[in-house]
Image: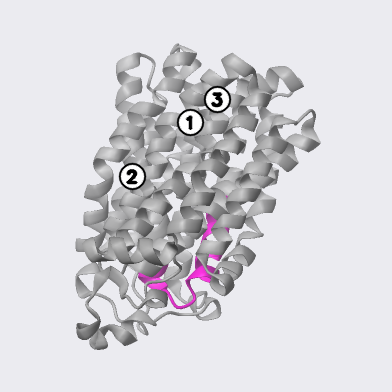
Amino acid sequence: MRENVLKYFNTKFFYGWIIVGVANLGIFSSGPGQSHTFSVFVGPISKDLDLSNASIASAYGLATLIAAFLLPYMGKIIDKYGPRISLIIISIILGISCIFFGATSNFLMLTVGFGFLRFFGQGSLMLGCANMVSQWFDTKRGFAMSLMALGFGISMAIHPPLSQLLIEQFGWKYAWVILGISTWIIMVPALYILAWNTPESVGLRPDGVNQSNSQQNDVKEIEGLNLSEAIKEKSFYILSAMWFGMAMLVTTLHFYQVTILTSQGITTDFAAGIFSVSAVAMVLFMPFVGKLFDNYPTKYILALGLTINSISLLFITFANNELYAIIYAIFFGINNAISMTMFGYVWPRYFGRKHLGSIQGTGQMIGVIGASLGPLPVGFAIDYIGSSLETVRYLSIYPIIIAIVTIFFLKSPTSLSVNKKLD
């Protein structure tokens, strides 16, 4: 059946776009492991389990930190077995993790549940999807990644209000059972029938390059530094600092958006619903962002994304009415469009795709560490200072510093051939 599906679609257009569609579903299905979904559950969990904001943020941070250190091993597994079988197993375990999280009754179970959801959802599922798309595209990778990342925007639009509805109808525990079952229904059949590891495995080439004209591209296709070579490059540390900060600060906004906005007089329903505004902005800007990555020097696009990240952090601290909250949500949506495209784009762009899993896994580990630490300063500020606004404003300085470093010092490794327009 899978071979027939491949033959049918490839006679119509390049099969890589089907891979993008499957990966899009994967990014959407990572929603139960993402901060924008957790944001809706913080209040009910705090009330039901009698835990403070700082306690929940600590459980979230500790679990995410532990999960982060396992991601390089997942990257090696993806390199060894390929993204298809890896993603099928990841999706199955993610569904089980959701059901386990719904059975949480104390701080320890909450921490373990967070760990499984973050590792298999926000970590492994996104890692595998980005790896699969990276294998199928080269010169069109930015645009392909932007289409893949639309799944995140759809998740932002659907998972928070859906979760709020499920909480109201069934309670927060049964809501997680429903989210887990939906993960199996969405992902397992699509991966089993439609996914293929690489274009070469089915006689194709990245970007749909015609085989008869692809000899000149063969060397480029197999280019790539291994992990030990990559960590000797200055660009690895600049990208790591950038991805650490972006993941940290975006997660902070996702996790505490409802809390920060309601502290300034916005209603809970409006604060939760405004995720949809960000999602729409993200969806509208995503293809444009992908084209920017494919056609302009990468360092400037990364610096732009970091600057918008800083603006988002500042603007939420002034969102004391619904109009300002909507303006913040639009900036945050653009921020998500850039960060989600960046997530899958930068590692193959600077280090090739030959050993992509291990490098991407290490990069994802760094990002998840940032995500684990992000909510902590804000959580402690809420509990012990009474307001998070000044803390968030101080955090907005970090992306500006990294943007300046990126512009002046980020360069491609000399051992890789790179399209000159991207440097």
Amino acid type, residue under disc 1 in the picture: His
* SS majority, magenta: helix
Amino acid type, residue under disc 2 in the picture: Ala
Task: Write down the region rendered in magenta.
Answer: 347-368
The residue wearing badge 1 is: 159
The number of numbered discs placed on residues in the rendered structure image is: 3
Q: Residue 241: image x %, image y %?
A: 48, 58
Residue at 42% of width from left, 76% of height from top? 201
Mark 1 vs 2, N-terminal side: 1
Contact (CB < 8 A) between labels 2 and 3? no
Asked where in the image residue 55 lies, by quadrant, the reply is: top right
Mark 2 vs 3, N-terminal side: 3
Q: Nearer the viewer, mark 1 or mark 2?
A: 1
The residue wearing badge 3 is: 40
390 over 400 or under it: above or below: above
Which disc, if any, is residue 337? 2
Q: Which of marks 1 and 3 is in front?
A: 1
